Amino acid sequence: MNHRLITSRMATDWLGSVVSINCGVMLGIYQGEVSSVDHASQTISLKQPYRNGVRCPVPEVTFSAMDIKELKFLDIQNTVNKTSTEQGCTPETSVISSGHPMPSNKATNATNESSRSSTTQITILRRAQTGSSNSRGATHSTQRRSGVRNGFAGGSVRSKDDECFGEGTDEGLDTDFDFEANLALFDKAAVFSKIDGIRGHKAQHHSTQTEQKPQSYRHDENILERKPVIYRQITVPQHGGKEYCTDSGLVVPSIPYELHKRLLGAAERWGLTVERRLETIGVCSSQMALSLLGGPNRLTPKNVHQRPTVVLLCGPHIQGAQGVSCGRHLANHEVEVILFLPNFVKMQESISSEVSLYSRTSGLQVSSIKELPASPVDLVIHCLDSHENPLMREQSWYQSAADWANRNRAPVLSIDPTTNEGPQAVEAKWALSLGLPLPLAERESRLYLCDVGIPKLVFQEVGISYHSPFGCKFVIPLHPA
């Protein structure tokens, strides 16, 4: 029997079978139903063909043996095995080859076993890998692919992949996966039955574990038992009549000025002197002022030609000394500071020492309203009021400074505002209280609280149960409760 061909009876039996033909990288992989096999011209035809998974526009395609790299039967008829057994012959493993048989005892034995069981589903037919004809075909295929990639038909110039990895790599890498053949080997019913069994076992195991173990937690939950938050952590023996709250909801009660004065006196006895308190207030108030001026967006080395201007209006008292301390720190941060302080015959020692320190900075000091800028400035810091002497508001220098501040139309920050009733001489946009707030009159100012460094036991000494509401900050906003 000629090994190059199958018998005409076998070709007739294989008509109608569904096959997959691999014609290499250039031509692609085809699937379809065998319509004819011509053993004389060594061709096979498929009807209703698909190329690389896409339906071909033509109803039938014919292939030559020289173009076929691999042939798979996806749905072979059982009549092939039956006919071969009746005739006493073994089905050949090469339906179409390039001229020589594939003498493989393993393939023959495997086919015989498949024929005896009559359960053959897939037959894979490959071209022989030995012999001169196969080598000649491989060389021809490689040269043809290389020639096409380099823009001409033929030639010995190899592609970049061949030069890097050697010959014969494209065929294995570019072969498409045969999903239809792989799916034919997949027993869906058995696999899904096994999956359902595993799911049922896991569900039963999970229900048992849930009954035995406590509730689990997510990655963003606290595994420790959380105590309820107490929002009223500060209690005072004398209430000022108003309450405020922080951004986190903590209640901060106000205290009358008499209790506030006792608190500062107790802090002085324990070492928090007036000078130390002035320094703390100066640092915190200047930091708040720098933020109001624009912070890093305004104060940069590239913006020295537009440095902000701040005017401090201070009186001859402890509140005025707090303003001078703030001005000194602002001048140290390259802010244009102008300090207004009238010439007084007698001033407190604290303000005299603060003015002496301020004179060593680049800031200016004036004693007349006429020397203040006529154009609007960036910020005005109001430290004219005194807790001890409210009648100072009736003096001429006070009224002149207040009128200038109202005409300048600059935003105003008031440090340590008083509880004086009636209209305010200077309308402040922001107000900064110290330690605990005073019961301020209803006004449009936004209230802030400054930590002046009073220890907890000092609060306890004057009868205040205190827990710090500041958290990680030294200045926090307060809202009406």
Image (cartoon, rainbow, N blue to C red):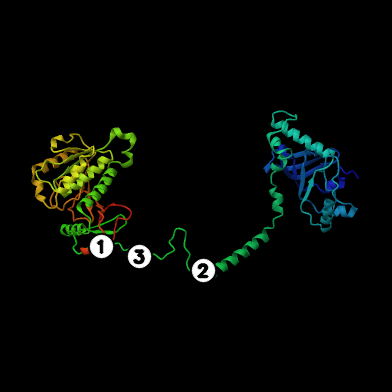
Q: Earlier in the sequence, mark 1 or mark 2?
A: 2
Q: Which mark is residue 210?
A: 2
Q: Within 10 angstroms of label 1, few (less than 14), some, or many (20 or more) residues?
A: few
Q: Give the left or right position of residue 31, taking residue 230 as reference.
A: right
Amino acid type for the residue under numbered disc 1 = Leu
The alpha-carbon separation of the residues under discs 1 and 2 comes to 49 Å
Task: Please tell me which residue lies in front, 354 or 296.
Answer: 354
Disc 1 marks which residue?
Answer: 457
Q: Quadrant of residue 304?
A: top left
Q: Find disc 3 in the rendering and name its residue.
A: 228
Can residue 210 be spotted in the picture?
yes
Q: Is residue 305 left or right of residue 97?
A: left
The one nearer the camera, 282 or 183, is 282
Q: Which amino acid, by three-letter code, is at mark 3?
A: Pro
Screen quadrant of the N terminus: top right
Callout 1: helix, strand or loop?
Answer: helix
Task: Tell me the kind of residue under disc 2.
Answer: Thr
Residue 291 coordinates in the image, percent (x, y): 29, 44
Q: Residues within 10 Å of mark 2 (few under 14, many from 20)?
A: few
Badge 3 marks a residue whose secondary structure is loop
Disc nearest the viewer among 1 and 2: 1
Between the C-alphas of marks 3 and 1, the distance is 25 Å
Residue 59 shows up from this direction? no
Q: Position of residue 441 (x, y in %)?
A: 17, 53
Residue that appears at 69% across and 42% down: 173
The residue shown at (70%, 51%) is 182
Given contact means CB atoms under 8 Å apart, are the residues at marks 1 and 2 in contact?
no
